[in-house]
Amino acid sequence: MTPRHVVLAVLTVALVAAGCGAGDERAPGTAGADGDAQLSVSREGWKTDFERHSVPLGEFSSGGPPRDGIPPIDRPRFVSPAEASTWLKKREPVLVVERGGKARAYPHQILIWHEIVNDELAGTPIAVTYCPLCNSAVVFDRRVDAATLRFGTTGNLRRSDLVMWDDATESWWQQLTGEAVVGELTGKQLRTLPAETLSFEQFRERHPTGEVLSRDTGNERDYGRNPYEGYDDPDSKPFLLEGEADPRLPPKERVVSIIRGKRATVVAFSRLRSDPVAEVSIGDEMLIVLFAPGVRSALDAGEIQRSRDVGTAGVFSRELGDRKVTLVAAGDGRFRDRASGSVFDVTGRAVAGPLKGQRLRAAVHDLSFWFAVAAFRPDARIVAG
């Protein structure tokens, strides 16, 4: 099935939502000279203040479904890893969030049909978000000023990336950047929380008492099936991306993106497959990127469990107590510290040696398609091999 056929099929079942492209950002709270005249998507039913926006309104396009036509999960339920293993295969991808000693896994086979989970973990209200068209999985703190927001899907896209909305002001938010770009809260920025994409097997090994998002969502969906079959062909054209994608990498090359303010640094999976360790300096931060195989794509085969292995990556501080670790690949998804000889895994945990039991501090990052990062951060720096 070609990507074009995939998109048509997705539109038919009203299950497309995401957006990434180009265009200059305006100062927060300003409107263009022609106001909202360029808005090509429906304003019907919206209480959004369209006079306030930091991006051109003409950049928004309809993804097919109406507001919350792709329903967010507002009352998530969870099961044990043992119970989840009856329907979740070992190498299927899950988005893992840890806070306050608790760990939860959000399977991509569920996220792909809902895109947003409004949850609370260890007292922190969080929004777990996934944009299938950009393959971008980002977790946010839902608190803005004194308010705790509930997020939904607008049904609109910008630059092929999911555009969210909040239920307090009906402002529109860019999923990949976490910024309010239209409405009363224009210019506000959600705080991004650390998260990592792992296989279900990796999650279960690291967090045997963790929780897994249940398929009991209150919605009838064909969980386990990928409605975007074949979409992640690296050379294929992204859906609803105007203009040409940045040619420095294939459009849908998977990348690790580390964004700090207006500065973005990218490490391509193709580089990490040949050398699974990359050291990255961003300002004063000394980070290390670790890559390991064993995680299937959510966007390849019609059944996620039959998709190809694309691997995963984590980003961590090199500092561990009063030392800086220097890791080298040790095979089988493991990494050895040159000084201590301790062995680490892709989650940053020391699993053998003098440092066993200690863990590197996780750094905020995203695993997404290259075109999406480049569309919002055209000056992104690519780490060479």
Image: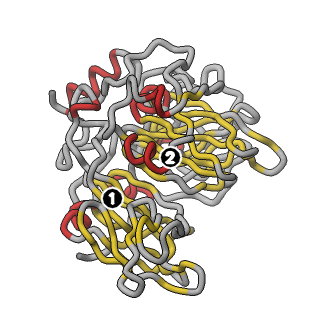
- Residue shown at 29% from the left, 54% from the top: 254
Horizontal and vertical percent position of residue 344? 40, 68
Q: Which residue is mark 1?
A: 255
Report which quarter residue 299 is drawn in.
top left
Task: Pick whichever, 165 or 307, lies toward us.
Answer: 307
Horizontal side of residue 104 vs 17, given as left or right: right
x and y, in percent, of residue 214 in the image: 52, 25
Query: Can residue 20 be seen by looking at this rendering?
Result: yes
Report the Cα–Cα distance between label 2 and label 1: 18 Å
Tell me the kind of residue under disc 1. Answer: Val
| Residue drawn at point x = 28 percent, y = 20 percent | 9
**Front: mark 2 or 1:** 2
- Residue 320 x/y as whole percent: 54, 78
Secondary structure, mark 2, is strand
Q: Nearer the viewer, residue 121 or 229?
A: 121
Relative to 315, 170 lies left or right: right
Q: How is the image coloured?
A: secondary structure
Residue under label 2, please give it. Answer: 96
Residue at image position (65%, 43%) is 126
Residue 164, numbered label: none
